[in-house]
Amino acid sequence: MSNIVIISGSPSQPSRSSAISTFLENKTLEEGLKVSKISVRDLPAEDLLFANFNSPVIKEKLTLIQQANAVIIVSPVYKASFPGALKAFLDLIPEKGFENKAVLPVVTGGTIAHLLSLEYAFKPVFSVLGSQEILNGVYFQDNQISYKEDQLSFIDHEIKQRLENSLKGLLERFQTKQLIN
Ligand SMILES: Cc1cc2nc3c(=O)[nH]c(=O)nc-3n(C[C@H](O)[C@H](O)[C@H](O)COP(=O)(O)O)c2cc1C
């Protein structure tokens, strides 16, 4: 059973946000937790476009989410909101699919102007999906990171710290819950 699911929402390749999701995946593994990654880019395009709830691939990914205790969504901002491919996948998740799961959103954008997309675009969808634990989230401006030849580096060390602290906060919540239950 996987404990953490990371959903990578970029349809692009190479992808900055996907590189951040790999960074988070490695950090989570270092903590000895199980982690699964779902990249919307790798999902069958027709299943997303035509909302194919019967797709075996989609069903397999939804099972991973169902079994997870926490979800990290890492996505670029597209047109002040999320990429259509990510929304198409989120649309396939059952109505209360994030119930009892903490959700950490991590968003990258070309400009700081769309920082609030976290609040008005991303978080309402996680709320509709039933999460009652949506963490503050981290927003990266492209100039705070460098991504060349598959190498991610953080130009702004403060934001790296913020990302690591957010992940730590998420994992601690989840580990505390396990101790209680
Ligand atoms: C189609 C498209 C739309 C975008 N729209 C926005 C936007 O509205 N606001 C913004 O800050 N950045 C926007 N960007 C920039 C991306 O969010 C940014 O470069 C992001 O880091 C790309 O992530 P990725 O490499 O993981 O796809 C857009 C990029 C593309 C390709």
Image (cartoon, rainbow, N blue to C red):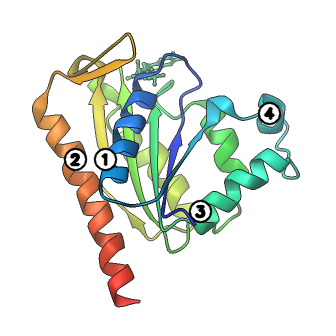
Look at the numbered discs 4 and 2 and tell me whether their residues touch, using CB distance below 8 Å.
Answer: no
Task: Residue type at mark 2: give it.
Answer: Glu
Q: Please indicate, yes or no, whether residue 116 appears anywhere in the rendered image.
A: yes
Q: Mark 3 points at which residue?
A: 129
Q: Which residue is drawn at 85% across and 37% down?
A: 50
Look at the numbered discs 1 and 2 and tell me whether their residues touch, using CB distance below 8 Å.
Answer: yes
Label 3 or label 1, whichever lies nearer to me, is 1
Label 2 or label 3, whichever lies nearer to me, is 2
Observer-nearest residue: 26 or 96?
26
Instruction: Check disc 2: other Cα within 10 Å, few if <14, some if 14-19, many if 20+.
Output: some
Residue 81 screen position, x and y as percent: 50, 34
Task: Residue type at mark 1: give it.
Answer: Lys
- Ligand 1 sits in which quadrant? top left
Q: Looking at the image, tell me whether mark 4 or mark 3 is earlier in sequence order.
A: 4
Q: Which residue is drawn at 37% across and 51% down?
A: 29
Task: Residue type at mark 3: give it.
Answer: Leu
The disc placed on residue 27 is: 1
Look at the numbered discs 4 and 1 and tell me whether their residues touch, using CB distance below 8 Å.
Answer: no
